[in-house]
Image (tube, rainbow, N blue to C red):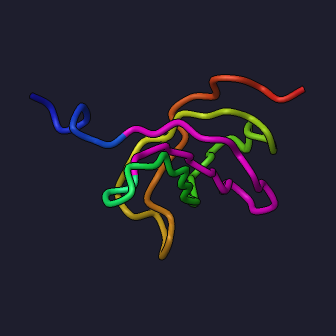
């Protein structure tokens, strides 16, 4: 099994594109509360490397874990699944 296939992959929405070669992606997930068994929506923001500055706010993207590229950036854009527009 290759190392690339073991990397985490997430799907999220771009919520910020003000930086050069970096976008902020919000990944939403739905789970069950451990005690109350109620559906809970949670989200997390990731700083993601976008080499070509192709992503805009509202785009749905697939991101993959990679080596640390800066202090807070260790994900990169794999592909743009749906363009906003």
Total marks shown come to 0
Rendered-image quadrant of the C terminus? top right
Q: Nearer the viewer, residue 31 or 3?
A: 31
> In which quarter of the view is residue 77 placed?
top right
Q: What is the quadrant of residue 7 in the picture? A: top left
Q: Is residue 54 left or right of residue 78?
A: right
Q: Residue furthest bottom?
A: 71
- Which quarter of the figure has residue 13? top right
Q: Residue at x 78, y 54 (%)?
A: 17
* Residue 68 percent across, percent down from the top left: 39, 64
Quadrant of the snapshot with the N terminus? top left
Q: Main secondary structure of the magenta part?
A: strand
Residue 30 lies within the magenta run: yes
| Residue at 68% from the left image edge and 54% from the top image edge | 23
- Outermost residue toward the right in this view: 85
Q: Residue at x 62, y 51 (%)?
A: 26
Is residue 5 positioned above or below 30 on the image? Answer: above
Residue 29 spot, x, y in % from top left: 50, 44
The correct choice, above or below, for 36 with respect to 2 in the image is: below
Residue 41 at x, y percent in the picture: 55, 50
Residue at x-position 54% and y-position 58%: 44
Foreground: 74 or 10? 10
- Where is residue 14? Give x, y as percent: 71, 46
Q: Residue furthest left?
A: 1
Q: Is residue 14 inside the magenta stretch?
A: yes
Q: Which residues are magenta?
A: 9-32
Horizontal relation, residue 66 to residue 51: left or right = left
Nearer to us in this view, 78 or 85: 85
């Amino acid at each position: 099994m290759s190392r690339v296939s073991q990397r985490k992959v997430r799907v999220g929405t771009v919520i910020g594109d003000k930086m050069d070669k970096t976008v902020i992606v919000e990944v939403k997930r739905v789970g069950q509360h451990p005690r109350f068994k109620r559906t809970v929506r949670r989200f997390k923001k990731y700083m993601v490397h976008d080499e070509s500055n192709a992503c805009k706010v509202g785009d749905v993207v697939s991101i993959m874990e990679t080596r640390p590229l800066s202090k807070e950036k260790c994900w990169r854009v794999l592909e743009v699944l749906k363009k906003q527009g």
